[in-house]
């Protein structure tokens, strides 16, 4: 029976290639999720290594499969980074965007230089770029570019099979090394105490914030009931006047007059004996209870509260500080829980001078009436949705691919973004436009995850399976020197980047290393820097460089092939 299965399973996988892909995904995701201390390979590397093993069975899979999933993946990447990419090149994020461009050019120079010195062809060079910079998306762009270099089909196949070899060898240090350099060597290069700098930044950007922090400035939600005494301070005042006279952000959420619950309108006059439901910070409510009678009125204070994610699209609040927005009438009765930014969902610190930008997702808590007012002022409620606008996705990929297919001859070399590069640009444009006009169409977060993660990993699975039979030979051809090339390509840009940020761009030390992590598209390194800093302030510098570099480093797959092709006289 065992012998039969040993023979039957490989034969079935060869005849049904779709099964080979799915077993590669299953095992790859499982391996990628295993943790070794604080390190994990990740789904991409796990899938690649599994694909190489499965590929030893000699399974032939059509290249069209990886092309379909790769173009879907790149569209999703563009759609996710679009708002930050456009803001970076069009507004106050320009210095960070230019920094990302400079760092990307340094990265390209280091990778190309290492490859040329070592005598690598475009295949090993493309794998070196993808692994040392952990930018798997560049692999697809590089393989497209190789098809247009004039090499024979056999040469192209040989070069493509070398990509996963270099990627697998250089990826681990690309991940761990970047985080270690930025988190531990970075502060020494800058000669700063990163934790102290972040604490200083928080103090400087909390001017005007109440003692309870900016979250309390927007209202920390607790509701209690109080009876208005005869001759009391607020007797005879309107509801709006009473709230203004409180001196704290206290809000009257409900009123009971003559045993009847009435609508708490701003012009409602409060009378002795009325019971009011007051919301605000707990400390303020405790102080209020010491001055007036607190009563038990469950029906009055039983006000439904909801948490809502709001996608910021309003031009009027773009670039406004939280302390400014907290003073607006629409902020009444609302608690600000978090502000997330970028496709990676980076949570930025809630400080008085923290600015909101289009594309940010703000989580608020309050009654339905209050949250509806904030939604109207900021943008629209980003409520969980299950339906994807496939008209938007399909047309975006198709039109972007058509534009990307246009060819520009340069010294006899056909220069083109390719269909996948065009889809990336289309995704950026549509992702940004959705923050201007949300009605353009919805792509739920779960769908974006599928397109991002599964799209890329199906592509990587096919690459690994196809390269499997020649992987050992490629490893022998690459030699151990590829590992040292990876050390250089990973380390040198990350040693230079903090110094470039300090001396050329004059970044605040608190966000400098976050900018570096974003420019290297390394979420793990950003998290390590924040851990060392004991603050998420560094992540304020992460999102714009990440959006720009995620696009450029992907397109560097084309650039590295052209540079190696020209350098070799091809």
Image (cartoon, rainbow, N blue to C red):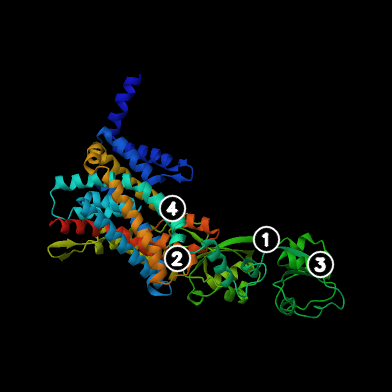
SS category of the residue bearing label 2? helix
| CA–CA distance in space, label 1 to label 4 | 47 Å
Would you name the residue on which mark 4 appears?
180
Whether tag 1 and tag 3 are in contact, CB under 8 A, the answer is no
Q: In the rendering, at what x and y percent does residue 217 appear?
A: 64, 70
Q: In the rendering, at what x and y percent does residue 495 appear?
A: 38, 59
- Does the image show residue 518? yes
| CA–CA distance in space, label 4 to label 3 | 52 Å
Q: Is 449 situated above or below 303?
A: above
Residue at the image point whose x is 76% and y is 61% from the top: 299
Whether tag 1 and tag 4 are in contact, CB under 8 A, the answer is no
Would you name the residue on which mark 1 appears?
304
Q: Which mark is residue 512?
A: 2
Q: Earlier in the sequence, mark 1 or mark 3?
A: 3
Q: Earlier in the sequence, mark 4 or mark 3?
A: 4
Whether tag 1 and tag 2 are in contact, CB under 8 A, the answer is no
SS category of the residue bearing label 3? helix
- Does the image show residue 391? no
Of the two numbered discs 4 and 3 in the rendering, the one whose residue sits closer to the viewer: 4
Q: Which of marks 3 and 2 is nearer the N terminus?
A: 3
Would you name the residue on which mark 3 appears?
289
Q: In the rendering, at what x and y percent does residue 220 appear?
A: 67, 65
| CA–CA distance in space, label 3 to label 2 | 47 Å
Q: Left or right: 277 with respect to 344?
A: right
Whether tag 4 and tag 3 are in contact, CB under 8 A, the answer is no
Q: Which of marks 1 and 4 is nearer the N terminus?
A: 4
| CA–CA distance in space, label 1 to label 2 | 43 Å
Q: Which of marks 2 and 4 is nearer the N terminus?
A: 4
| CA–CA distance in space, label 2 to label 4 | 15 Å
Q: Which mark is residue 340?
A: none
Q: Left or right: 239 with respect to 550?
A: right
């Amino acid at each position: 029976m065992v012998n039969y299965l040993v023979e039957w399973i490989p034969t079935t996988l060869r005849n049904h290639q779709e099964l080979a892909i799915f077993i590669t995904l299953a095992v790859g995701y499982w391996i990628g999720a295993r943790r070794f201390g604080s390190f994990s390979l990740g789904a991409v590397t796990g899938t690649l290594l599994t694909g190489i093993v499965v590929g030893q069975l000699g399974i032939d899979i059509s290249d069209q499969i990886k092309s379909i999933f790769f173009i879907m993946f790149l569209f999703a990447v563009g759609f996710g980074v679009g708002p930050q990419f456009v803001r970076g090149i069009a507004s106050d994020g320009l210095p960070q965007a230019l920094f990302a461009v400079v760092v990307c050019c340094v990265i390209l120079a280091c990778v190309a230089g290492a490859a040329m010195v070592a005598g690598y062809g475009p295949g090993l060079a493309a794998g070196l770029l993808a692994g040392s910079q952990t930018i798997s998306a560049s692999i697809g762009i590089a393989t497209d570019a190789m098809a247009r270099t004039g090499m024979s089909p056999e040469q192209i196949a040989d070069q493509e099979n070398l990509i996963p070899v270099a990627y697998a060898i250089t990826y681990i240090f690309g991940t761990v090394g970047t985080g270690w350099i930025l988190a531990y060597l970075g502060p020494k290069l800058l000669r700063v105490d990163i934790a102290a700098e972040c604490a200083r930044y928080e103090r400087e950007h909390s001017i005007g914030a109440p003692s309870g922090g900016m979250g309390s400035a927007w209202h920390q939600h607790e509701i209690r009931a109080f009876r208005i005494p005869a001759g009391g301070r607020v007797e005879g005042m309107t509801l709006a006047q009473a709230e203004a006279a409180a001196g704290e952000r206290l809000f009257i959420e409900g009123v009971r007059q003559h045993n009847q619950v009435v609508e708490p309108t701003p012009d409602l006059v409060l009378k002795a004996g009325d019971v009011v439901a007051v919301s605000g910070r707990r400390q303020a409510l405790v102080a209020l209870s010491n001055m007036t009678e607190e009563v038990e009125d469950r029906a009055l204070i039983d006000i439904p509260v909801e948490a809502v994610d709001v996608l910021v699209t309003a031009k009027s609040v773009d670039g406004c500080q939280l302390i400014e927005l907290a003073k607006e009438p629409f902020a009444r009765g609302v608690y600000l829980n978090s502000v997330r930014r970028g496709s990676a969902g980076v949570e930025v610190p809630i400080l008085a001078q923290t600015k909101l930008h289009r594309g940010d997702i703000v989580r608020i808590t309050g009654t339905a009436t209050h949250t509806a007012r904030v939604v109207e002022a900021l943008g629209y409620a980003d409520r969980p949705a299950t339906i994807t606008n496939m008209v938007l996705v399909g047309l975006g990929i198709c039109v972007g691919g058509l534009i990307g297919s246009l060819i520009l001859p340069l010294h006899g070399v056909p220069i083109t973004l390719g269909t996948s590069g065009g889809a990336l640009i289309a995704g950026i444009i549509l992702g940004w436009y959705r923050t201007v006009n949300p009605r353009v169409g919805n792509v739920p977060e779960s769908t974006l995850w599928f397109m991002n993660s599964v799209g890329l990993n199906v592509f990587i699975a096919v690459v690994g399976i196809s390269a499997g039979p020649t992987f050992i030979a490629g490893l022998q051809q690459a030699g151990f020197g590829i590992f040292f090339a990876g050390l250089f390509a990973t380390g040198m840009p990350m040693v230079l980047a903090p110094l470039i940020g300090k001396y050329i761009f004059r970044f605040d030390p608190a966000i400098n290393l976050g900018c570096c992590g974003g420019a290297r598209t390394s979420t793990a390194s950003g998290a390590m820097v924040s851990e060392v800093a004991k603050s998420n302030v560094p992540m304020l510098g992460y999102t714009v460089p990440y959006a720009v570099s995620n696009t450029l480093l992907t397109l560097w797959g084309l650039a590295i092939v052209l540079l190696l092709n020209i350098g070799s006289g091809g």
